[in-house]
Image (cartoon, rainbow, N blue to C red):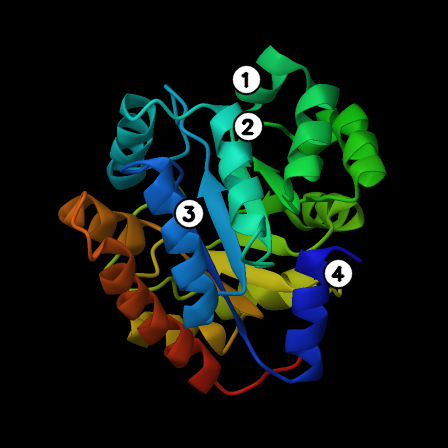
Amino acid sequence: MNRIESRFARLRSQQRKGLVVYIGAGDPHLEATRQLALEFDQAGVDVLELGVPFSDPLADGVVNQLAAQRGLASGTTPSSVLKTVADIRRDSQIPIVLYIYFNLLHRVGLDHFIAQAAAAGVDGLLILDLPPEEADDYEALMRKAGMCPIWLVAPTTPDARIERIARRAQGFIYYVSREGVTGMQSTVSTSIGDMTQRIRQHSQLPIAVGFGISNPDQAREVATHADAIVVGSAIVNRIAQLGSDPTLAAQVGAFVRSLADAVRSASASPA
C-alpha cells in the first residue's frame, strides 16, 4: 500500500473527504514548488498533483497552459521535477502524483522514468494522453515500482468503458466533471451526483472529482458526492498573480486551507 492508498484508507476510516491540489511544477521556480508542497501538507492537503511542464498541454485551459510556459521558462525539466520531489520527501510524506504527458516519458524511456520517479518518492502518475487500452506495458512497470496509475473518467464515458477503467485503476479514480479543458468555473456541474453513482457501480476505489472547482463553497458542494475534490486552476491563478512574492507559499497556503476546511465540513457519504 503506497502513500495514496494509505491516505484514502485513513480518510475512509475517519469518514472524511479528501482534498487533492494541482500546481504546475517550476511555477515560478522549483524552490517555490518545494515550499508550496510543504505548506499544503500543513494546510490539510491529502494528495499533491505536480504538473510536469510540457510545450503542448492539450488537456489544459489557459491558466494551466501559462503555468506550463512559466515552468519551462524557469528551466524545469522532468529530471529536475523528480529532484524536487526527493527534496520534498526530506520533510514531508504527502502523497504526490505527477500530472504528465506521455511524450515526456517516451523521450527518456518509460521504464527508466518510472523507476526514477519511484526512487524520488512519487506515488502515482496521471498520464493525460495515454488510453488505458494501450497501457499494458506501462501498468506492469507501475505495479513493479509500487506506484498507482491514475485514470480519468469523463461525463461522456460509457458504462462499458467505466468498467474497463475501474478494473485497471489504482489509488483513486479521477472524475473529470466537465467536458473540455481544465479551468475555473462559476458553477459546478449538475451531473456529478449521478456520475459518481455510476462509477461506484463498477469500483470501490475512492472517486476524486475535479475540473472547475474554484472556491470553498463549490468544494463543499462537490464533496457531498465525492470521496475527494480536486482544485487546480484557482490555485495556479493565485500563484500567477503573486509570482516571486516572498509570501507566496503563505498566501496560497491560506487559500488552500480554506478549501481543506470546506471539504472537511462536508457530511460523509457512502463510498
Q: CA distance from mark 4 to mark 3?
A: 34 Å
Circle 2/circle 1 CB separation < 8 Å: yes
Quarter holding residue 60: top left
Q: Between tags 2 and 1, which lies in front? A: 1
212 lies left or right of 1: left
Q: Which residue is mark 1?
A: 103
In the rendered view, tell whether residue 124 sits above or below residue 223.
above
Residue tagged 2: 129
Q: Position of residue 126 (x, y in %)?
A: 58, 39
**3D distance between C-alphas at marks 3 and 2:** 26 Å
Kind of residue indicated by mark 1: Asn
Amino acid at pointer 3 = Arg
Mark 1 or mark 4, earlier in chain: 1
x 60%, y 56%: residue: 95
**Distance (Cα) linking label 4 and label 2:** 22 Å
Measured Cα–Cα span from mark 1 to mark 4: 29 Å
Question: Disc 4 marks which residue?
Answer: 203
- Residue 34: image tag: 3
